Image (cartoon, rainbow, N blue to C red):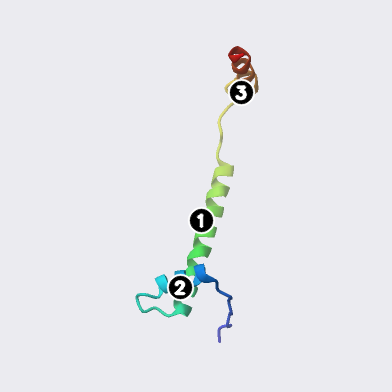
């Protein structure tokens, strides 16, 4: 048997539940679906972060961005 979870809602959560249950879905069903969808989004975001961290960023182009910014600032004075 599945565990029962109790949540405390506020006005914003109640409104969201009202929107999600307009089609006749039960509160329990929409909460389960929301938790599952949130987990999928979380896993996708983590996978994308891992992929970005694995990406080769290329070789340095020899430009010292700090020095360039400093020169630009000095030229504006």
Q: Residue at x 36, y 79 (%)?
A: 24
* Quarter of the image that includes the C terminus: top right
| x, y percent for residue 28 | 48, 79
Residue 41 versus residue 24: which sits nearer the camera?
24
**x 56%, y 87%: residue:** 1
Q: Measuring from the top left, give residue 3's x and y in whole percent.
A: 58, 82
Q: Considering the numbered disc 3 on the image, is that residue within a helix, a strand or a loop?
A: helix
Mark yes or no: residue 33 visible. no
Whether tag 1 and tag 2 are in contact, CB under 8 A, the answer is: no
Q: Is residue 23 left or right of residue 45?
A: left
Q: Which residue is mark 2?
A: 17
Quadrant assignment, res 7: bottom right
In the depicted view, which residue is nearer to us: 46 or 11? 11
Of badges 3 and 1, nearer the viewer stands 3
Gap between marks 3 and 1, in whole Å?
33 Å
Where is mark 3, residue-wise? 65
In the image, 65: left or right of 19? right
**Residue 31: % across, % down:** 49, 74
Q: Residue at x 55, y 43 (%)?
A: 52
Sequence order check: which comes first, mark 3 or mark 2?
2
């Amino acid at each position: 048997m599945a565990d029962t979870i109790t949540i405390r809602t506020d006005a914003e959560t109640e409104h969201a539940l009202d929107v999600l249950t307009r089609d006749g879905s039960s509160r329990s069903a929409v909460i389960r679906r929301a938790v599952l969808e949130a987990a999928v989004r979380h896993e996708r975001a983590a996978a994308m972060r891992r992929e970005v961290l694995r990406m080769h960023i290329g070789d340095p182009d020899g430009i010292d961005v700090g020095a360039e910014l400093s020169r630009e600032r000095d030229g504006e004075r």
